[in-house]
């Protein structure tokens, strides 16, 4: 018998297999029904497991949501950081950051929908941790915009407000994107990169 193929996707590093299946099932259930309307029985059933088996890997439904949110936010933040560190002008770096961030939200739209819109269901400690990751995300984009303003390439009177608008525009892709739509994730990324450069008054 040949070697088993290594799992791919955002949950590839989650082990054992049962824990990974539960995360995948939770993402699908939360995206379809919402966190509060989903039961642990729903998640376990979708994963082909008993409700009792779920508690071997995750103590509560909230812990599942936290794990999904933590992994999703860290992956998206890493996408932005790599774009931030790419050599080039502020306009090139901002376009690349938006392009990659939007593409991630499109390619992983089901996970991103849960990550971005179920934040309020997290417990206090987990909520604070995820908010810290969101502040880091904001800081990466804001730094690129500030670089553009300092270089005279961007015309942005309100950097913080513009940063929020850029991130909100990108994140919202997860809400409406479908795999059978007219645009691919890459095409949406290119479109939004152009829109954001116009938003910041790019002079390049």
Image (cartoon, rainbow, N blue to C red):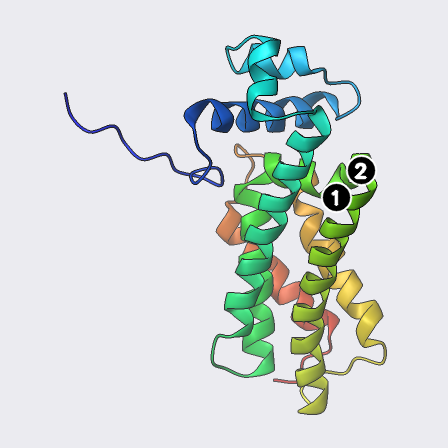
Q: Hey, which quadrant is residue 201 in on the image?
A: bottom right
Q: Position of residue 188 (x, y in %)?
A: 57, 52
| Residue for badge 2 | 123
- The C terminus: image quadrant: bottom right
Please give the residue where the numbered disc 1 appears in the rendered image.
126
For the residues marked 1 and 2, what is the alpha-carbon distance in whole angstroms? 5 Å
Left or right: where 156 falls relative to 7: right
Instruction: Answer above or below: position of 129 versus 20.
Output: below
Q: Tag 2: Cα neighbours inside 10 Å, few (<14), some, or many (≥20)?
A: few
From the image, which quarter does the N terminus lie in? top left
Q: Position of residue 117 (x, y in %)?
A: 76, 39
Residue 114's place in the image compared with 2, above or below, is below
Tags 1 and 2 in contact by the CB under 8 Å rule? Answer: yes
Residue at image location 56% in from the left, 8% down from the top? 50
Front-most of residues 3 and 148: 3
Q: Please tell me whether residue 130 is drawn above or below residue 203 in the rendered image.
A: above
Residue at 66%, 91% in the rendered image: 151
Q: Which mark is residue 138?
A: none
Residue 191, horizontal then vertical, whole percent:
59, 58
- Disc 1 crowd rating (10 Å Cα; few below 14, some 14-19, many 20+) is some
Q: Residue at x 73, y 55 (%)?
A: 169
**Helix, strand or loop for disc 2:** loop
Is 204 on the left or on the right of 175, as rendered? left
Q: Nearer the viewer, residue 179 or 113?
A: 113
Quarter of the image for residue 192 reads bottom right
Determine the residue positioned at 68% across, 32% down. 63
Which corner quadrant of the image does residue 196 belong to? bottom right
């Amino acid at each position: 018998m040949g070697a088993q193929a290594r799992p791919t996707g955002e949950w590839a590093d989650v082990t054992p297999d049962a824990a990974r299946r539960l995360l995948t099932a939770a993402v699908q259930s939360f995206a379809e029904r919402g966190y509060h309307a989903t039961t642990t029985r729903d998640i376990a059933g979708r994963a082909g497991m008993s409700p009792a088996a779920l508690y071997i890997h995750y103590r509560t439904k909230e812990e599942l949501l936290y794990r999904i949110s933590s992994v999703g936010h860290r992956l998206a933040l890493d996408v932005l950081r790599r774009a931030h560190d790419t050599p080039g002008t502020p306009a090139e770096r901002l376009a690349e950051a938006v392009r990659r961030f939007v593409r991630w939200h499109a390619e992983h739209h089901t996970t991103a929908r849960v990550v971005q819109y179920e934040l309020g269901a997290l417990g206090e400690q987990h909520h604070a941790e995820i908010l810290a990751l969101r502040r880091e995300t904001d800081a990466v984009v804001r730094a690129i915009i500030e670089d553009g303003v300092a270089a005279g390439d961007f015309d942005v009177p309100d950097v913080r407000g513009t940063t929020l608008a850029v991130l909100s525009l990108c994140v919202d892709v997860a809400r409406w994107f479908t795999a059978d739509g007219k645009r691919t994730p890459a095409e949406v990324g290119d479109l939004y990169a152009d829109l954001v450069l116009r938003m910041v008054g790019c002079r390049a």
